[in-house]
Amino acid sequence: MSRPHFFALLLCLALLPTRFSQAELPPVRSVEQVDLQRYTGKWYEIAAIPMYFQRQCIGDTTAEYALLPDGEIEVTNRCRTENGFDQATGRAWPAAKEQSARLKVSFFWPFRSDYWIIGLDADYRWAVVGNPNRKFLWILSRTPQLPPMEFERALKAATEQHFPLDQLKPTRQTETAP
């Protein structure tokens, strides 16, 4: 066997367990329905498997949602950085009329990403948001701190969906957050 073929075979064998382990996971499910009016307002990030754009955030991360007259949702993400605060504003909309728990979010046209609510407290005190490929996850709360039992319930929603919780990072929230 030639050297290039040997390395190609070795690479395929190395990737084989990864390929099968991903294929064995069931698809991510969102909650059935979300009352978007109740979901609007300010949420505090408690923990996250962050997206690339969050790399400069060092704490006090929040998301604020407001329903717009056209039915879309204005999204304002804010976080503390080394130099103050950073803010991004975008829009979200249901991916399908009957799927209010599965949103599309865009901060820069034409780019958009999936925002699936995969866990939600009955009283809308906390939410767990992820995406279908399990690369990102956010645990959100209506308050800067989430009581331990509530945090465990939120973690359970993520665990049941097979998100890689070893990548989950806590978010520092302070009382000085605007």
Image (cartoon, rainbow, N blue to C red):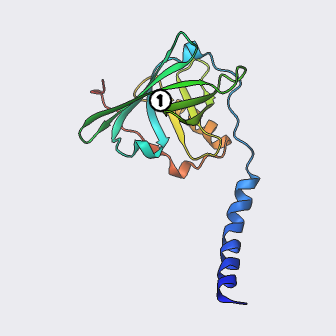
| Quadrant of image for the N terminus | bottom right
- Element assignment for label 1: loop
- Residue at 60% in and 26% down: 120
Within-10-Å neighbours for mark 1: few <14, some 14–19, many 20+: few
Please tell me in which quadrant of the rendered image residue 121 appears.
top right
- Residue at 34% in and 44% down: 56
- Residue at 48% in and 27% down: 141
Residue furthest out toward the front: 110
Q: Amino acid at mark 1?
A: Pro
- Residue at 51% in and 37% down: 138
Please tell me in which quadrant of the rendered image residue 32 appears.
top right
Q: Nearer the viewer, residue 70 or 116?
A: 70
Q: Please state the horizontal and vertical placement of residue 170, each as a whole percent of the image.
A: 43, 42
| Quadrant of image for the C terminus | top left
Residue furthest out toward the bottom: 1
Question: Eyeballing the image, is 32 above or below 135?
Answer: above
Q: Please state the horizontal and vertical placement of residue 172, each as a whole percent of the image.
A: 36, 38
Q: Please state the horizontal and vertical placement of residue 164, each as a whole percent of the image.
A: 58, 50
Please tell me in which quadrant of the rendered image residue 78 appears.
top left
Horizontal side, residue 87 vs residue 15: left or right: left
Q: Nearer the viewer, residue 46 or 70?
A: 70
Which residue carries the number 1 mark? 147
Horizontal side, residue 160 vs residue 48: left or right: right
